[in-house]
Image: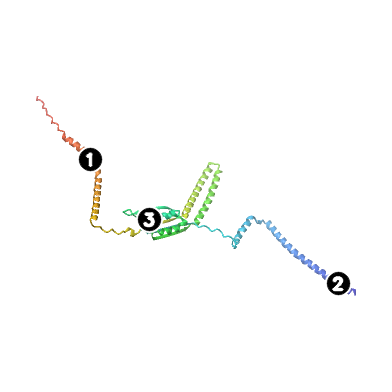
Amino acid sequence: MKPRHRVPALLAAALAVFVAVFVAVFVAGCGGGANEDSGSRSTAGGAAADKGTPAQTPADNLRDGAAAQPEDAAKPGAKPAAALERAVIATGSVQLTSGDLEAARGQAIGLATGAGGHVDDEQSQSDQRGRLVRVDLTLRVPAASFERTLDALGRLGVVKHRQQSVEDVTTQVIDNTARIKAQSASVESVEQLLARANTIGEVISIENELARRQADLDSLKQQQRWLADQTGMSTVQVSLLRSHKAAEKPAAPARAGFLAGLDGGWHALAGTAVALSTVVGALLPFVVVLALVGVPAWFFARRRRGVPAPPPAEVQQSPSS
């Protein structure tokens, strides 16, 4: 009976040993796989290092950060980049008629100077009586006051024509600024070479190159100043014309009576006196010349007539031999 009771116990012990061995083998297999993966990764890393693969540098990190910047900028909390300021050249012209050109001219100049501008050019035409018939003005006003000044000029009379245009020169300004910066650096580098020159030939060659680059830099700066002037101050051409109503005034009605006759006679006398004085003034230079030449000639001729002629000489006869 004892052997029968020992068989189930032995079977249970064997089963427990089998389960323990199976669990140990399973755990060891999982750990070995993880070790193999890490080992293979380290081996691959070492192989990459052996092959000369460069390690990631701060510049790579900076580049990665720059590449990731658009994604960060797309986030709702990101701040937008500053908008590029436009550079434009604004020009305009207005032609209008007015009954009082002198007053309209003064008001147009006042509008320009009041806005912080000035008169760049002025031309005027008058009729035979000295009255203004046309005034042409070239005004320079700040770009910020261009539209406001153009509207105010249109209220000085009856507008016949108005025109305005805007030219965008933002790209040209940016390009010019970049070229000036590069050319300045180029001039500085040549100046450094000139300081290290040892021979006369080197000095002459470097000075010629420096002069050429300095001339290019001065030209670029001149363009920059012109662009700054054109974009900062706008040009407005103003043409003022006298209206036909002011040019064609109705003639005054003819007057009659004693006073009218007296006024007409007085004006006729004044006109005659003016005509006579004009004739006298025209003849006076000739009278003076004739007096200076004729009086001495008349006096000399009179003296010649007053002197008696000498008697004729007697003819002496020689004695006959």
Of the pair 82 and 50, the residue shown nearer to us: 82
* Helix, strand or loop at mark 3: helix
Q: Amino acid at mark 1?
A: Ala
How far is disc 2 from disc 1 in space, using C-alphas? 178 Å
Instruction: Name the residue rendered at 55%, 43% in the picture.
Output: 195
Q: Residues within 10 Å of mark 2 (few under 14, many from 20)?
A: few
Q: Are marks 2 and 1 in contact (CB under 8 Å)?
A: no
Of the pair 41 and 242, the residue shown nearer to us: 242
* Helix, strand or loop at mark 2: helix
Provide the residue designation for mark 2. Answer: 9
Residue 96 position in % (x across, y down): 38, 59
Residue 245 visible here: yes
Tell me where residue 26 sits by quadrant: bottom right
Q: Which numbered circle lies on residue 301?
A: none
Residue 287 position in % (x across, y down): 23, 42
**Left or right of 96 in this view: 16:** right
Q: Which numbered circle lies on residue 291?
A: 1
Provide the residue designation for mark 3. Answer: 103
Would you place residue 321 above or below residue 19 in this image? above
N-terminal label among 2 and 1: 2
Q: Amino acid at mark 2?
A: Ala
Residue 241 position in % (x across, y down): 36, 57
Locate the N terminus by quadrant: bottom right
Q: Which of pointers 3 and 1 indicates the residue nearer the eye?
A: 3
Residue 59 position in % (x across, y down): 63, 55
* Helix, strand or loop at mark 1: helix
Instruction: Name the residue rendered at 21%, 38% in the picture.
Output: 295
Q: Amino acid at mark 3?
A: Ala
Q: Residue furthest top?
A: 321
Tell me where residue 54 sits by quadrant: bottom right
Would you place residue 310 above or below residue 243 in this image? above
